[in-house]
Image (tube, rainbow, N blue to C red):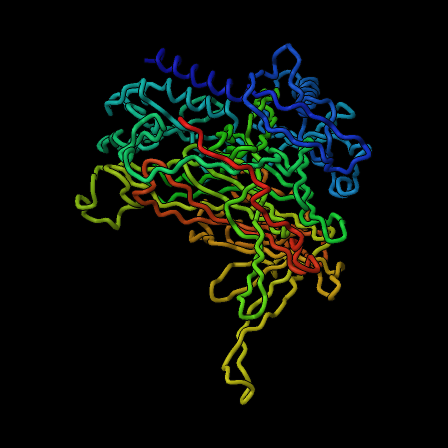
Amino acid sequence: MEKSYCFKFIIIISIAVFIFAYSRYPPENLGCSTSTPPWCTTKTHRKTNLRSTSIFDSGKPNSNHYFADTPLHPLDPLTIPEINKVRSILTGYEPFSLTFPSINSLSLDEPEKIQVVGWKTGDPFPPRRASVIAFLSGQTHLVTVDLGLGLVTDHVVNTRSGYPMLTNDDLATALQLTYSNLEFNKSILARGVDLNDLACIPPSSGWFGPDEEGKRIVKVQCFSNQDTPNFYMRPIEGLTITVDIDKKEVIKITDTGRGIPIPKAAHTDYTYTTKSPFYDMDPMTNPMSMEQPKGTSFTINGDTVKWANWVFHLKPDIRAGMIISQAMIQAEDGEYRSVMYKGFASELFVPYMDPDQSWYFKSYMDAGEFGLGANAMALVELNDCPRYSYYMDGVFASADGRPIIQPNMICIFERYAGDIGWRHSEIPLMGFDIRESRPKVTLVARMVASVGNYDYIFDWEFQTDGLIRIKVGLSGMLMVKATPYENIYNISNTNDMTGTLVSENVIGVVHDHFISFHLDMDIDGANNSFAEVNLVKEETLSRQSPRKSYIKAKRKIAKTEDDAKIKLKLYDPSEFHVFNPSRISRLGNPTGYKIVPSGTAASLLDLDDPPQIRGAFTNNQIWVTPHNKSEQWAGGLLVSQSKGEDTLATWSARNRDIENKDIVLWYTLGFHHIPCQEDFPVMPTVSSSFELKPVNFFDRNPIMGVKPIFQKDLPVCSVASS
């Protein structure tokens, strides 16, 4: 029995190592001269599936700039030589010289904002430093390494609650301890599950009081993968193993569900090679692709992207997934003007709504506990991303401090879905024969994080009219609960259910998803203000008009953080502007951008509920804080098992001044998910978005000069005979 588990465990770890350690050869970097602007017009190349290489091979590595000794931009992530150098420095550092710590995070310690903004191509780089979160002997170490000096310049041991992001080694330890536990094995066999058909996952535990303090806890729950790769739909209900991953021991087993059957495997397989029940149903769509006969319109130099009137820096990140920095747009006079200094998904909070012993703790912080970039699997060409996409790898550090490559984790592509950028036609009655229309072509940067059962699709879409749309899509598998009931007619009291019966013996538990975005807006410079523009009903005066009422826009500038805490209300409509009071348009309006919310959701949990204390950044949909380099993660720097002492809500409680300051806008996108049968066995993507839209930023419509498309511009294609 134990041999079977060991063999299975070795296979799982081997596959994980293979995925993380291998990458494809990218196209050769053509380079730029120091006289060119930061975005450089080097033509980009599409990566193709070439022979994989390990970064530990003794042969010459590929020509990706991550292998270079020096970066191309101050915000470029650490290169492979730099990561190796950090590891070497830490190995010789006295506190770690005898026992090397577990490296939970190793990334660029970004230079101060003023240094980055002032840097131009050809200038000396600001000092390159690494920020390291390491764990050793029960303590979290926050370490700064100066690569130029070759030494540790700062070292702090965390004294507050919370632990670093869980590593693959941590999760593997939890699984290994579970597989080798005799009581656990007896329970599995008692339920009639073959040990070779066992699949287990290590969810995080949250924080629910002092009983589990002082130790790093992981909960393990299991499924049967007999006759299906979709083990998530076959839970072994009521069995939860609590593991202390530092002492390497199982400290508790909860086994309450032996009378609950494991759901059947029928109709759960979602893979293409398996015929689904709907296999013969029409209509089937034919393959399609947007063709670009002259190639793509964007160029990429290192991590800097230039497209149409936009230029921005795009960086893979182990925690946030991807970070957009120094987004600038070209104005009518050719000047590149600042819109946003830095934007990224700061935290992803997913609380489930079931008080059962095997469910109450499921209140995940996917970015801070597991890492969105760490769980970004390679994108599927032609399906995740269209033809002519450019793929970008992530370079991170493993638990032992060595560099690993996350291949093809980001794709960049142009999109044209038949949308219209602007148009106008005149009917002949007016004496004009005008039919003017322009296509809306946009640029998308996409990353997908597969965090356990859920897949999160993150899109940053740039439009030529200055608009940025940030969109999040949810797909993957429901986290389901097994039940004795096959249909609702068997259930005596459906009010006791915590979700929807989505298949026989399967309940899709109600849950929420909240994604908090950190948006360091720099509209024409760093010093900005925030205004709430309320739409207020006004009553007409007597005999003034046949109208009884109308609405008027009233602008209120936020002075402090409390003034900028916004709960969205349908019947109290407002616009929310970030503007530069010192940059005035030709008509006298301050230049700005507004955040345009789409469908969203608010947390309904009690404010003193333990999950909500940790996820307090969802108490408002909008926050504004002063720029602070240490305040980037809405759930806190150390999220795992934290008590919520270091969150956006605690920072903002200081009620600091925010008028005409370097400010950060925070927006939380939310989903309430009541599962339904159509979510089984795999969910169709559901998505929501918000927009950053220019307000008095341009003197006129910035896409007046966009050219229409004519037939002569496109190739003539015909269907090839089979």
Identify which residue is drawn at 59% across, 26% down. Answer: 47
Query: Could you tell whether 354 is left or right of 294 in the image?
Result: left
Q: Nearer the viewer, residue 652 or 386?
A: 386
Placement of 311 over or under 392, stated as above or below: below
Give the residue displayed 59% in from the left and 59% down from the top: 576
Q: Is residue 666 left or right of residue 269?
A: right
Quarter of the picture holding the N terminus:
top left
Res. 164 in view: no
| In the image, residue 282 above or below residue 720 | below
Between 568 and 424, the residue placed more toward the observer is: 424
* Residue at screen point 69% across, 29% down: 130
Residue 65 position, x and y percent, is 68, 25
Q: Quadrant of the rendered structure where residue 285 is?
A: top left
Looking at the image, residue 12 sits to the left or right of residue 301; the answer is left
- Measuring from the top left, give residue 242's x and y in whole percent: 40, 29
Coordinates of residue 374 in the picture (x, y in percent): 53, 30
From the viewer's perspective, tell me whether residue 219 is left or right of residue 622. left
Q: Where is residue 111 in the image (x, y as percent from the top left)?
A: 73, 37
> Relative to residue 467, is residue 52 depicted above or below?
above
Q: Can residue 79 be seen in this view?
A: yes
Picture quarter containing residue 226? top left
Picture mark count: 0
Quadrant including the C terminus = top left
